[in-house]
Amino acid sequence: MAEKQIAIIGGGPAGLMAAETLSSSGHRVNVYDSMPTVARKFLLAGKSGLNITHSEDFDVFAERFGTSSLRLHAALEDYKPDDIRAWAKGLGTETFIGSSGRVFPTAMKASPLLRAWLTRLEAQGVSIMTRHRWSGFSNGALTLETPQGSKIVTCDAMLLALGGASYPRLGSDATWVDWIRSKGVDVATFAPANCGFDVAWSALFTERFAGAPLKAVTATSDAGTFPGEFVISKTGVEGSLVYAHAAVLRDRLLHDGTAALTIDLAPGRSVDRLVRDLARQDPKASLSNRLRKGAGIEGVKAALIRELAKPTPLSQAEYLAHLIKALPIPLLRPRPIVEAISSAGGICWSELDQHYMLKKLPGLFAAGEMIDWEAPTGGYLLTACFATGRAAAKGIDAWLRQPTS
Protein backbone atom coordinates (compact mmCIF):
# COMPACT_ATOMS: atom_id res chain seq x y z
CA MET A 1 0.00 0.00 0.00
CA ALA A 2 1.30 3.44 -0.95
CA GLU A 3 2.05 5.86 1.89
CA LYS A 4 -1.12 7.60 3.01
CA GLN A 5 -1.49 11.12 4.39
CA ILE A 6 -3.35 11.36 7.69
CA ALA A 7 -4.31 14.56 9.50
CA ILE A 8 -4.82 14.49 13.27
CA ILE A 9 -6.50 17.53 14.81
CA GLY A 10 -5.52 17.79 18.46
CA GLY A 11 -2.20 17.10 20.13
CA GLY A 12 -3.37 15.66 23.43
CA PRO A 13 -2.88 12.07 24.65
CA ALA A 14 -5.47 10.59 22.24
CA GLY A 15 -4.09 12.39 19.20
CA LEU A 16 -0.45 11.67 19.98
CA MET A 17 -1.16 7.99 20.69
CA ALA A 18 -2.97 7.75 17.35
CA ALA A 19 0.00 9.44 15.66
CA GLU A 20 2.41 6.95 17.19
CA THR A 21 0.28 3.98 16.14
CA LEU A 22 -0.28 5.20 12.58
CA SER A 23 3.31 6.25 11.94
CA SER A 24 4.45 2.83 13.18
CA SER A 25 2.23 1.34 10.46
CA GLY A 26 3.97 3.29 7.71
CA HIS A 27 1.58 6.23 7.28
CA ARG A 28 2.55 9.87 6.93
CA VAL A 29 1.03 11.69 9.90
CA ASN A 30 0.56 15.42 10.47
CA VAL A 31 -0.68 16.57 13.88
CA TYR A 32 -2.27 20.02 14.13
CA ASP A 33 -2.86 21.77 17.45
CA SER A 34 -4.27 25.21 18.17
CA MET A 35 -2.00 25.93 21.13
CA PRO A 36 1.68 27.03 21.06
CA THR A 37 2.66 23.61 22.45
CA VAL A 38 0.94 20.22 22.53
CA ALA A 39 -0.49 18.20 25.44
CA ARG A 40 -1.04 21.17 27.75
CA LYS A 41 -3.74 19.47 29.83
CA PHE A 42 -1.49 16.40 30.09
CA LEU A 43 1.26 18.62 31.51
CA LEU A 44 -1.15 20.30 33.92
CA ALA A 45 -2.19 16.89 35.25
CA GLY A 46 1.48 16.13 35.78
CA LYS A 47 1.88 19.01 38.22
CA SER A 48 0.08 16.94 40.86
CA GLY A 49 1.82 13.68 39.99
CA LEU A 50 0.39 12.50 36.64
CA ASN A 51 -1.92 9.66 37.60
CA ILE A 52 -1.34 7.73 34.38
CA THR A 53 -3.52 4.66 34.99
CA HIS A 54 -4.80 2.33 37.74
CA SER A 55 -3.63 -1.06 38.96
CA GLU A 56 -6.95 -2.62 39.96
CA ASP A 57 -8.18 -5.84 38.36
CA PHE A 58 -9.01 -5.16 34.71
CA ASP A 59 -12.57 -6.47 34.94
CA VAL A 60 -13.24 -3.91 37.69
CA PHE A 61 -11.30 -1.19 35.87
CA ALA A 62 -13.30 -1.66 32.68
CA GLU A 63 -16.59 -1.06 34.52
CA ARG A 64 -15.59 2.41 35.77
CA PHE A 65 -16.97 4.16 32.69
CA GLY A 66 -20.66 3.98 33.51
CA THR A 67 -22.99 3.62 30.54
CA SER A 68 -20.01 3.75 28.16
CA SER A 69 -18.20 0.79 29.73
CA LEU A 70 -19.49 -1.72 27.19
CA ARG A 71 -18.63 0.47 24.22
CA LEU A 72 -15.13 1.26 25.51
CA HIS A 73 -14.35 -2.32 26.51
CA ALA A 74 -12.71 -3.42 23.26
CA ALA A 75 -10.37 -0.43 23.14
CA LEU A 76 -9.46 -0.81 26.82
CA GLU A 77 -8.88 -4.54 26.51
CA ASP A 78 -6.54 -3.91 23.59
CA TYR A 79 -4.54 -1.37 25.58
CA LYS A 80 -4.73 -2.28 29.24
CA PRO A 81 -3.17 -0.42 32.18
CA ASP A 82 -0.19 -2.81 32.14
CA ASP A 83 0.37 -1.95 28.47
CA ILE A 84 0.49 1.74 29.36
CA ARG A 85 3.05 1.07 32.06
CA ALA A 86 5.15 -0.88 29.56
CA TRP A 87 4.79 1.94 27.02
CA ALA A 88 5.98 4.50 29.58
CA LYS A 89 8.91 2.27 30.52
CA GLY A 90 9.86 2.08 26.85
CA LEU A 91 10.10 5.88 26.92
CA GLY A 92 12.40 5.77 29.94
CA THR A 93 9.72 6.46 32.55
CA GLU A 94 9.40 3.95 35.37
CA THR A 95 6.09 3.84 37.22
CA PHE A 96 4.94 2.79 40.67
CA ILE A 97 1.64 1.86 42.32
CA GLY A 98 0.51 4.21 45.05
CA SER A 99 -1.33 3.21 48.21
CA SER A 100 -4.69 3.84 46.50
CA GLY A 101 -3.82 1.60 43.57
CA ARG A 102 -3.22 4.56 41.27
CA VAL A 103 -0.18 4.42 39.00
CA PHE A 104 2.30 7.31 38.77
CA PRO A 105 5.65 7.97 37.08
CA THR A 106 8.47 7.55 39.59
CA ALA A 107 9.56 11.11 38.79
CA MET A 108 5.98 12.31 39.57
CA LYS A 109 6.14 14.59 36.51
CA ALA A 110 4.65 14.60 33.02
CA SER A 111 7.32 16.63 31.24
CA PRO A 112 10.08 13.96 30.98
CA LEU A 113 7.58 11.45 29.58
CA LEU A 114 6.19 13.96 27.08
CA ARG A 115 9.67 15.00 25.90
CA ALA A 116 10.65 11.39 25.27
CA TRP A 117 7.35 10.75 23.51
CA LEU A 118 7.73 13.72 21.17
CA THR A 119 11.28 12.61 20.38
CA ARG A 120 9.97 9.17 19.41
CA LEU A 121 7.22 10.67 17.24
CA GLU A 122 9.72 12.88 15.45
CA ALA A 123 11.95 9.87 14.80
CA GLN A 124 8.94 8.08 13.30
CA GLY A 125 8.35 10.96 10.89
CA VAL A 126 5.37 12.57 12.61
CA SER A 127 5.06 16.30 11.89
CA ILE A 128 3.54 18.42 14.64
CA MET A 129 2.29 21.89 13.71
CA THR A 130 1.19 24.17 16.54
CA ARG A 131 -0.91 27.34 16.33
CA HIS A 132 -3.03 25.58 13.71
CA ARG A 133 -6.68 25.89 14.72
CA TRP A 134 -9.29 23.83 12.91
CA SER A 135 -12.10 26.05 11.63
CA GLY A 136 -14.30 23.62 9.71
CA PHE A 137 -14.58 21.79 6.42
CA SER A 138 -14.00 22.97 2.84
CA ASN A 139 -15.16 20.61 0.08
CA GLY A 140 -14.07 17.54 2.00
CA ALA A 141 -10.80 19.10 3.16
CA LEU A 142 -9.93 20.72 6.47
CA THR A 143 -9.66 24.45 7.00
CA LEU A 144 -7.02 25.56 9.48
CA GLU A 145 -6.31 29.04 10.78
CA THR A 146 -2.59 29.70 11.24
CA PRO A 147 -0.46 32.77 12.05
CA GLN A 148 0.16 33.01 8.30
CA GLY A 149 -3.54 32.86 7.42
CA SER A 150 -6.01 30.16 6.38
CA LYS A 151 -4.73 26.81 5.16
CA ILE A 152 -6.63 24.04 3.35
CA VAL A 153 -5.42 20.54 4.19
CA THR A 154 -6.29 17.49 2.13
CA CYS A 155 -5.55 13.99 3.32
CA ASP A 156 -6.58 10.37 2.95
CA ALA A 157 -8.09 10.18 6.45
CA MET A 158 -8.70 12.53 9.35
CA LEU A 159 -8.83 12.03 13.10
CA LEU A 160 -10.42 14.54 15.45
CA ALA A 161 -8.98 14.42 18.97
CA LEU A 162 -9.99 17.86 20.18
CA GLY A 163 -10.98 17.03 23.75
CA GLY A 164 -14.10 18.01 25.63
CA ALA A 165 -15.05 21.36 27.16
CA SER A 166 -13.12 21.53 30.44
CA TYR A 167 -10.06 23.76 30.87
CA PRO A 168 -10.68 25.70 27.62
CA ARG A 169 -7.60 27.84 28.26
CA LEU A 170 -5.54 24.72 27.58
CA GLY A 171 -7.17 24.15 24.19
CA SER A 172 -10.29 22.06 24.80
CA ASP A 173 -12.86 24.75 24.08
CA ALA A 174 -15.48 22.66 22.19
CA THR A 175 -15.63 25.13 19.29
CA TRP A 176 -15.76 22.09 17.01
CA VAL A 177 -19.30 21.16 18.08
CA ASP A 178 -21.14 23.42 15.62
CA TRP A 179 -19.07 22.22 12.66
CA ILE A 180 -19.76 18.59 13.49
CA ARG A 181 -23.45 19.22 14.10
CA SER A 182 -23.67 21.05 10.75
CA LYS A 183 -22.88 17.69 9.15
CA GLY A 184 -25.87 16.08 10.84
CA VAL A 185 -23.85 14.40 13.59
CA ASP A 186 -25.54 14.15 17.00
CA VAL A 187 -23.45 15.69 19.78
CA ALA A 188 -24.58 15.45 23.41
CA THR A 189 -24.37 18.79 25.21
CA PHE A 190 -21.30 19.08 27.39
CA ALA A 191 -21.62 19.12 31.18
CA PRO A 192 -19.01 19.27 33.95
CA ALA A 193 -17.61 15.98 35.26
CA ASN A 194 -15.27 15.42 38.20
CA CYS A 195 -16.33 18.82 39.47
CA GLY A 196 -17.09 20.65 42.67
CA PHE A 197 -20.53 21.90 43.72
CA ASP A 198 -21.93 25.13 45.09
CA VAL A 199 -23.39 25.13 48.61
CA ALA A 200 -25.21 28.00 50.33
CA TRP A 201 -22.67 28.46 53.13
CA SER A 202 -23.17 31.25 55.61
CA ALA A 203 -20.72 34.15 55.40
CA LEU A 204 -19.30 33.29 58.84
CA PHE A 205 -18.70 29.63 57.92
CA THR A 206 -17.02 30.58 54.64
CA GLU A 207 -14.83 33.17 56.31
CA ARG A 208 -13.58 30.70 58.92
CA PHE A 209 -13.38 27.43 57.01
CA ALA A 210 -12.91 28.03 53.27
CA GLY A 211 -9.95 25.88 52.26
CA ALA A 212 -10.28 23.51 55.23
CA PRO A 213 -10.08 19.78 54.43
CA LEU A 214 -12.45 17.19 55.86
CA LYS A 215 -10.36 14.06 56.32
CA ALA A 216 -11.21 10.50 57.33
CA VAL A 217 -14.85 10.69 56.30
CA THR A 218 -17.10 8.73 53.95
CA ALA A 219 -19.56 10.18 51.45
CA THR A 220 -22.74 8.56 50.17
CA SER A 221 -24.92 9.18 47.12
CA ASP A 222 -26.62 7.02 44.51
CA ALA A 223 -23.09 6.20 43.31
CA GLY A 224 -22.40 4.32 46.56
CA THR A 225 -20.38 4.97 49.72
CA PHE A 226 -16.68 5.81 49.48
CA PRO A 227 -14.03 6.85 52.01
CA GLY A 228 -11.70 9.77 51.46
CA GLU A 229 -11.49 13.49 51.95
CA PHE A 230 -12.68 16.72 50.40
CA VAL A 231 -12.31 20.46 50.88
CA ILE A 232 -14.65 23.23 51.94
CA SER A 233 -14.35 25.94 49.28
CA LYS A 234 -15.58 29.52 49.23
CA THR A 235 -18.47 28.44 47.03
CA GLY A 236 -19.15 24.90 48.24
CA VAL A 237 -17.28 21.58 48.21
CA GLU A 238 -14.58 20.11 46.00
CA GLY A 239 -11.96 17.38 46.03
CA SER A 240 -11.49 13.72 45.15
CA LEU A 241 -14.28 12.39 47.36
CA VAL A 242 -16.76 14.84 45.84
CA TYR A 243 -15.59 13.98 42.32
CA ALA A 244 -16.34 10.31 42.96
CA HIS A 245 -20.02 11.25 43.28
CA ALA A 246 -20.09 14.11 40.77
CA ALA A 247 -21.80 12.32 37.87
CA VAL A 248 -24.84 11.13 39.83
CA LEU A 249 -25.13 14.38 41.79
CA ARG A 250 -24.96 16.44 38.59
CA ASP A 251 -27.62 14.30 36.94
CA ARG A 252 -29.85 14.45 40.03
CA LEU A 253 -29.62 18.25 40.05
CA LEU A 254 -30.40 18.32 36.34
CA HIS A 255 -33.49 16.11 36.61
CA ASP A 256 -34.83 16.83 40.11
CA GLY A 257 -33.42 20.23 40.90
CA THR A 258 -32.12 19.03 44.28
CA ALA A 259 -29.30 16.78 45.45
CA ALA A 260 -27.32 16.15 48.61
CA LEU A 261 -24.04 14.49 49.47
CA THR A 262 -24.37 12.60 52.75
CA ILE A 263 -21.29 12.60 54.97
CA ASP A 264 -20.31 10.22 57.77
CA LEU A 265 -18.06 12.30 60.01
CA ALA A 266 -17.08 9.36 62.23
CA PRO A 267 -16.80 6.22 60.07
CA GLY A 268 -15.13 4.23 62.84
CA ARG A 269 -18.00 4.61 65.32
CA SER A 270 -21.48 3.17 65.23
CA VAL A 271 -24.63 5.16 65.93
CA ASP A 272 -25.24 3.17 69.12
CA ARG A 273 -21.77 3.93 70.44
CA LEU A 274 -22.13 7.60 69.60
CA VAL A 275 -25.49 7.77 71.36
CA ARG A 276 -24.02 6.20 74.50
CA ASP A 277 -20.88 8.38 74.48
CA LEU A 278 -22.77 11.59 73.78
CA ALA A 279 -25.41 10.81 76.42
CA ARG A 280 -22.67 10.60 79.05
CA GLN A 281 -21.66 14.21 78.43
CA ASP A 282 -22.80 17.04 80.69
CA PRO A 283 -25.87 18.53 78.98
CA LYS A 284 -24.82 21.93 80.28
CA ALA A 285 -21.48 21.71 78.49
CA SER A 286 -21.01 23.49 75.17
CA LEU A 287 -21.79 21.64 71.97
CA SER A 288 -18.11 21.86 71.02
CA ASN A 289 -17.05 20.06 74.20
CA ARG A 290 -19.75 17.40 73.89
CA LEU A 291 -18.78 16.69 70.27
CA ARG A 292 -15.08 16.58 71.07
CA LYS A 293 -15.34 14.39 74.16
CA GLY A 294 -18.24 12.20 73.09
CA ALA A 295 -17.49 11.73 69.38
CA GLY A 296 -14.00 12.98 68.67
CA ILE A 297 -15.54 15.67 66.45
CA GLU A 298 -13.95 19.12 66.39
CA GLY A 299 -12.76 21.88 64.10
CA VAL A 300 -14.34 22.03 60.66
CA LYS A 301 -16.36 18.87 61.30
CA ALA A 302 -18.04 20.39 64.34
CA ALA A 303 -18.58 23.63 62.44
CA LEU A 304 -20.20 21.71 59.60
CA ILE A 305 -22.72 20.20 62.02
CA ARG A 306 -23.56 23.64 63.35
CA GLU A 307 -23.88 25.00 59.81
CA LEU A 308 -26.22 22.29 58.52
CA ALA A 309 -28.15 21.08 61.56
CA LYS A 310 -31.88 21.66 61.66
CA PRO A 311 -33.45 23.52 64.61
CA THR A 312 -33.93 20.26 66.54
CA PRO A 313 -32.11 20.65 69.87
CA LEU A 314 -28.53 19.48 69.48
CA SER A 315 -28.57 18.43 73.13
CA GLN A 316 -30.44 15.28 72.11
CA ALA A 317 -27.77 12.55 71.91
CA GLU A 318 -29.69 10.34 69.48
CA TYR A 319 -30.37 13.16 67.04
CA LEU A 320 -26.77 14.34 67.20
CA ALA A 321 -25.41 10.81 66.70
CA HIS A 322 -27.50 10.28 63.57
CA LEU A 323 -26.39 13.68 62.29
CA ILE A 324 -22.74 12.75 62.72
CA LYS A 325 -23.26 9.48 60.83
CA ALA A 326 -25.36 10.92 58.01
CA LEU A 327 -24.99 14.67 57.58
CA PRO A 328 -26.56 15.78 54.28
CA ILE A 329 -24.86 18.65 52.45
CA PRO A 330 -27.49 20.19 50.14
CA LEU A 331 -26.02 21.14 46.78
CA LEU A 332 -27.14 24.02 44.59
CA ARG A 333 -25.40 23.38 41.25
CA PRO A 334 -22.18 21.99 39.77
CA ARG A 335 -19.29 24.39 39.42
CA PRO A 336 -18.82 25.79 35.88
CA ILE A 337 -17.44 23.42 33.28
CA VAL A 338 -14.36 25.60 32.77
CA GLU A 339 -13.27 24.52 36.29
CA ALA A 340 -14.08 20.83 35.89
CA ILE A 341 -11.33 18.24 35.59
CA SER A 342 -13.20 16.65 32.69
CA SER A 343 -16.52 16.84 30.89
CA ALA A 344 -19.44 14.60 30.01
CA GLY A 345 -21.03 14.88 26.58
CA GLY A 346 -19.63 14.90 23.07
CA ILE A 347 -20.12 12.91 19.89
CA CYS A 348 -22.77 10.27 20.58
CA TRP A 349 -21.70 6.65 20.35
CA SER A 350 -24.51 5.98 17.89
CA GLU A 351 -22.68 8.21 15.39
CA LEU A 352 -19.52 6.06 15.43
CA ASP A 353 -18.88 2.63 14.00
CA GLN A 354 -16.85 0.02 15.88
CA HIS A 355 -13.64 1.51 14.45
CA TYR A 356 -14.36 5.05 15.72
CA MET A 357 -15.28 6.38 12.28
CA LEU A 358 -18.23 8.75 11.94
CA LYS A 359 -20.87 6.87 10.01
CA LYS A 360 -22.07 9.99 8.20
CA LEU A 361 -18.55 11.15 7.29
CA PRO A 362 -16.48 8.24 5.94
CA GLY A 363 -12.78 8.81 6.47
CA LEU A 364 -13.32 11.03 9.53
CA PHE A 365 -12.59 9.43 12.89
CA ALA A 366 -12.82 10.64 16.51
CA ALA A 367 -11.08 9.72 19.76
CA GLY A 368 -10.60 10.85 23.34
CA GLU A 369 -12.78 13.16 25.39
CA MET A 370 -14.69 14.59 22.44
CA ILE A 371 -16.73 11.36 22.48
CA ASP A 372 -19.64 11.09 24.94
CA TRP A 373 -18.12 9.17 27.85
CA GLU A 374 -16.92 10.08 31.33
CA ALA A 375 -14.94 8.43 34.09
CA PRO A 376 -13.83 9.15 37.64
CA THR A 377 -10.37 10.39 38.46
CA GLY A 378 -7.79 7.73 39.23
CA GLY A 379 -6.10 7.15 35.86
CA TYR A 380 -9.29 6.10 34.07
CA LEU A 381 -9.60 9.27 31.97
CA LEU A 382 -6.06 9.17 30.66
CA THR A 383 -6.15 5.42 30.00
CA ALA A 384 -9.31 5.74 27.92
CA CYS A 385 -7.81 8.62 25.94
CA PHE A 386 -4.76 6.51 25.12
CA ALA A 387 -6.91 3.48 24.32
CA THR A 388 -9.42 5.26 22.07
CA GLY A 389 -6.62 7.08 20.25
CA ARG A 390 -4.98 3.76 19.54
CA ALA A 391 -8.28 2.12 18.57
CA ALA A 392 -9.15 4.95 16.18
CA ALA A 393 -5.68 4.72 14.62
CA LYS A 394 -6.17 1.01 14.02
CA GLY A 395 -9.56 1.82 12.52
CA ILE A 396 -7.97 4.34 10.16
CA ASP A 397 -5.32 1.85 9.10
CA ALA A 398 -7.93 -0.84 8.41
CA TRP A 399 -10.14 1.62 6.48
CA LEU A 400 -7.24 2.83 4.31
CA ARG A 401 -6.34 -0.73 3.41
CA GLN A 402 -9.78 -1.38 1.98
CA PRO A 403 -9.82 -1.19 -1.84
CA THR A 404 -12.80 1.22 -1.79
CA SER A 405 -11.25 3.78 0.59
Image: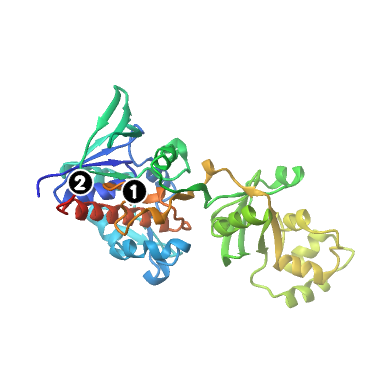
Task: Answer whether labels 1 and 2 touch (C-beta < 8 Å).
Answer: no
**Residue denoted by label 2:** 120
- Percent of width and height locating residue 351: 38, 53
At x 74% / y 77%, what residue is drawn? 272
- State the mark number for residue 263: none
Q: Nearer the viewer, mark 1 or mark 2?
A: 1
Q: Secondary structure at mark 2?
A: helix
Question: Can the viewer see residue 319 in this picture?
Answer: yes
| Side (left or right) of 157 relative to 225 | left
**Residue denoted by label 1:** 360
Q: How is the image coloured?
A: rainbow
The crowding category of the residue bearing disc 2, from other C-alpha atoms within 10 Å (few below 14, some 14 to 19, many at least 20), is some
Question: Would you identify the image quadrant in which residue 7 lies?
Answer: top left
Camera-side residue: 286 or 1?
A: 1
| Side (left or right) of 254 relative to 381 | right
- Percent of width and height locating residue 395: 25, 55
| Residue type, mark 1 in image | Lys
| Side (left or right) of 153 relative to 53 | left
As measured in the structure, the alpha-carbon distance from the residue carrying label 1 to the one carrying label 2 is 34 Å
| Residue type, mark 2 in image | Arg
Label whose residue precedes the other's in the sequence (1 or 2): 2
Question: Would you identify the image quadrant in which residue 305 lies?
Answer: bottom right
- Percent of width and height locating residue 376: 48, 58
Q: Residue furthest top?
A: 148
Question: Can the viewer see residue 241 in this picture?
Answer: no
Q: Secondary structure at mark 1?
A: loop
Camera-side residue: 93 or 66?
A: 66
Count of numbered tags: 2
